[in-house]
């Protein structure tokens, strides 16, 4: 998958843009620290020059959360495992480590992330800071797997934060939106390596919607995709097995056919066809929903959780109460047909456990996640706006790294600890060294 681009020339910085091409900026300068002390020094230089600071990872957020008009910190060089305790499963990762690289490194030690999302190109710090999650009613988002972090602060400190050290900051620092400082390392509670047995097949959409609250708890990790203009749901059920369970990964030819041809290459062609000839979209979706996702496989968890995606899209994602999934999707279906939109990309539905992380979209409630996508060549604005209106009406909370229109005044009622988070931000960054236009909008200036 392509990632965001950034480079520094002798006379200054070139334009940076995110993966989805929804945000771009030319920073005043780019710095590339490779140690925590270098991060602290870069922050000090930025403050001396009156510039704000923002770190970047893979640039996979669809929002402007990583946009850096001032000093852009490229954390690519701040990567790798810095400590492993195999007896406890506690592993410390440098902030710029990509999730796919982290999974491979953990696997070498007989360890794994407890849960992952379906994309793993993000940096660990970026994924945590935006509220990245996977699926599974017994499992929280990535931030719930943290046990401590080290934060480079505006006043030049490297601050250790955990449930026992600076504990009053812990519920905010676990998912901080990059608004509290720069994460330089994160200690994660991992689990022993395990196998996932994947069962993916289509089912009638109405059956899945009618019993989603029950169905979402029947397997360890459950999700489904719905292609608009069809009545099928593509269900995915992943069951956790011991590390020594038999593995039946897809062979190289089938993997290429499923992932590269059907999942990316051919799908790109079909999306382009649908964009040029919208009347073909319903037929394309019916074909895709019947043939693209029927498989059984078993492999190490990180090889099942995540898939490579090269077809670019724009995405909005909200968490809602578990029982809202059926009403939301049926209303979305009605609005799509009423407006005559021809939507190639599927809607994705997942579920997670409740947690106690202040700005988590699952704070205080078990949650379903509904993600709405639009192919990059299509105008995403009216469709995503309509979807957002439906999701907001069902007590929805937007994913911090996905497109949404919410601002501080109407986010505050959705998060019981919103003002507590803002108070921590005021304490750690009173001069707003780490702000940008997106954070000014969602947290207030």
Image: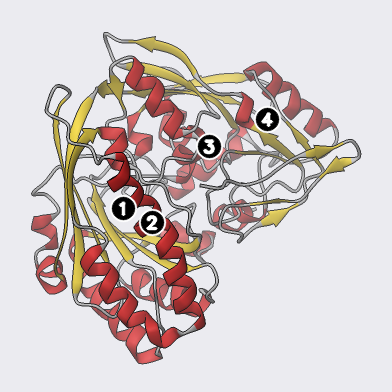
- SS at circle 2: helix
Quote the CA–CA distance across marks 3 and 1. Answer: 47 Å
N-term mark: 3 or 1 = 1
| Residue that label 1 marks | 258
Position of 43 compared to 338: left or right?
right
Count every numbered label the image shows and give the total. Answer: 4
- SS at circle 4: loop
Pick out the residue farthest to the right: 11
Quote the CA–CA distance across marks 1 and 2. Answer: 6 Å
N-term mark: 3 or 4 = 4
Looking at the image, is 184 positioned above or below residue 3? above
Position of 129 compared to 35: left or right?
left
| Residue that label 4 marks | 154
Quote the CA–CA distance across marks 4 and 2. Answer: 47 Å
Q: Nearer the viewer, residue 306 or 34?
A: 306
| Residue that label 2 marks | 261
- SS at circle 3: helix
- SS at circle 1: helix
In this rendering, which labeled residue sits more in front, label 3 or label 4?
A: 4
Looking at the image, is 109 positioned above or below residue 438? above
């Amino acid at each position: 998958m392509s990632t965001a681009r950034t480079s520094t020339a002798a006379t200054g910085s070139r334009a940076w843009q995110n993966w989805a091409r929804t945000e771009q900026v030319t920073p005043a300068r780019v710095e590339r620290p490779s140690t925590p002390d270098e991060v602290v020094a870069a922050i000090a230089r930025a403050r001396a020059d009156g510039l704000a600071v923002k770190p970047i990872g893979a640039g996979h957020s669809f929002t402007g959360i990583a946009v850096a008009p001032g000093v852009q910190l490229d954390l690519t060089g701040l990567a790798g495992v810095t400590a492993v305790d195999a007896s406890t499963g506690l592993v410390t990762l440098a902030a710029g480590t990509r999730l796919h690289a982290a999974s491979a490194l953990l696997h070498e030690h007989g360890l794994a992330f407890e849960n992952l999302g379906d994309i793993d190109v993000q940096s660990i710090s970026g994924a945590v800071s935006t509220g990245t999650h996977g699926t599974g009613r017994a499992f929280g988002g990535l931030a719930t797997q943290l046990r401590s972090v080290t934060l480079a602060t505006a006043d030049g400190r490297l601050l250790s934060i955990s449930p026992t050290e600076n504990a009053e900051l812990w519920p905010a620092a676990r998912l901080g939106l990059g608004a509290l400082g720069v994460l330089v390392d994160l200690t994660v509670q991992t689990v022993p390596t395990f196998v996932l047995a994947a069962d993916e097949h289509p089912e009638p959409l109405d059956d899945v919607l009618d019993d989603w609250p029950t169905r979402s708890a029947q397997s360890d990790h459950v999700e489904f995709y719905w292609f608009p203009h069809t009545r099928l749901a593509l269900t995915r059920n992943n069951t956790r097995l011991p590390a020594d369970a038999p593995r039946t990964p897809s062979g190289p030819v089938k993997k290429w056919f499923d992932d590269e041809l059907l999942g990316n290459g051919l799908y790109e062609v079909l999306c382009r066809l649908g964009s040029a000839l919208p009347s073909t979209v319903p037929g394309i979706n019916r074909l895709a929903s019947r043939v693209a996702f029927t498989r059984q496989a078993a492999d190490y968890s990180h090889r099942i959780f995540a898939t490579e995606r090269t077809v670019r899209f724009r995405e909005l994602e909200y968490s809602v109460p578990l029982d809202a999934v059926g009403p939301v999707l049926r209303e979305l279906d009605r609005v799509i047909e009423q407006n005559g939109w021809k939507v190639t990309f599927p809607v994705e539905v997942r579920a997670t456990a409740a947690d106690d992380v202040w700005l988590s979209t699952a704070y205080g409630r078990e949650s379903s996640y509904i993600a709405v996508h639009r192919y990059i060549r299509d105008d995403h604005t009216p469709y995503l706006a309509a979807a957002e209106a439906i999701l907001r009406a069902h007590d929805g909370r937007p994913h911090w790294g996905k497109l949404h229109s919410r601002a501080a005044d109407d986010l505050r009622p959705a998060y019981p600890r919103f003002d507590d988070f803002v108070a921590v931000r005021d304490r750690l960054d009173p001069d707003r060294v780490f702000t940008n236009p997106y954070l000014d909008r969602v947290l207030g200036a």
